[in-house]
Each structure stands twice: as structure tokens, then as C-alpha cells.
Amino acid sequence: MVDLARELKVAINTGKVVLGSRQTIKAILRGEAKAVVVAANIPNWIRDDVEYYAKLAQIPVIVYPGSSWELGAACGKPFKVSTLAIIDPGESAILELARG
């Protein structure tokens, strides 16, 4: 079993990731995002927007089981992270999680 928090850290350290809902949507619209991670507790209007654009671009959405504070901590940030887009997974296996 692949640990999502560990794979997020590896992706952040070895690949390229953008944080935040606006940056995530921009990455999806530009065709750069390979996967999207959303926190479990984000407001519905943000989740609906991100999932809508991800579905149009056929990009998988991974729901992080913790809160946005916990997602921020998993990313090594001292603030909330509601969504993030994986641009380059680096050495992580996070895209395997996205496929199922």
C-alpha cells in the first residue's frame, strides 16, 4: 500500500507541485496537471470547481483523508492547503494512487 502523505512529500521534494485552488485550476486549464489532490474538508464550491475542470481535462482527483491543515502539514507548509496539482511527480508513485 502506498502512503499518500509520504508520496506527497516525495513529489514536492523531487518533482513540481502547485498549491492552492486558483493555481490548481490554472494548471488544469493549461494542461500541465497530471493529478489533483484535494483536502476532505474544503468548501463545496471549491471542490466543485476543481473537480469540474479536472473532469473536463480527464485528470484524476485524489481526496486527502485529512483536513486542509493536515494536508498543509503533509506538504511541509505551516498553513492550510486546500488543493494542489501535481505537475511533475518526480520520484514519487503518487500517480499510481490516482489510477486506483
Image (cartoon, helix red, strand yellow):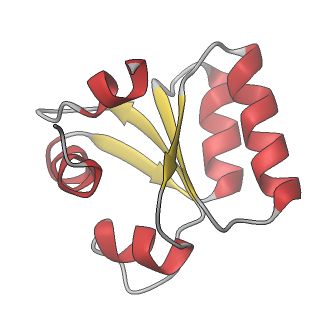
Q: Is residue 79 above or below residue 7?
A: below
Residue 57 vs residue 38, the one in the foreground: 38
Residue 73 in the image, given as x and y percentages of width and height: 34, 77
Residue 67 vs residue 74, the one in the foreground: 67
Position of residue 74 in the picture relative to residue 54 (left or right): left
Residue 70 in the image, given as x and y percentages of width and height: 42, 76
Position of residue 58 in the picture relative to residue 44 (left or right): left
Query: Residue at left 63%, top 49%?
Result: 23
Query: Residue at left 16%, top 35%?
Result: 92
Residue 47 in the image, given as x and y percentages of width and height: 76, 50
Q: Quadrant of residue 29?
A: top right
User: Where the N terminus falls, by quadrant?
Assistant: top left
Pick out the residue farthest to the bottom. Answer: 78
Position of residue 11 in the picture relative to residue 48 (left or right): left
Residue 50 in the image, given as x and y percentages of width and height: 73, 41
Please give the count of numbered marks on the rendered protein.
0
User: Where the C terminus falls, by quadrant?
Assistant: top left
Pick out the residue farthest to the right. Answer: 45
Query: Residue at left 28%, top 49%?
Result: 4
Query: Residue at left 63%, top 13%?
Result: 58
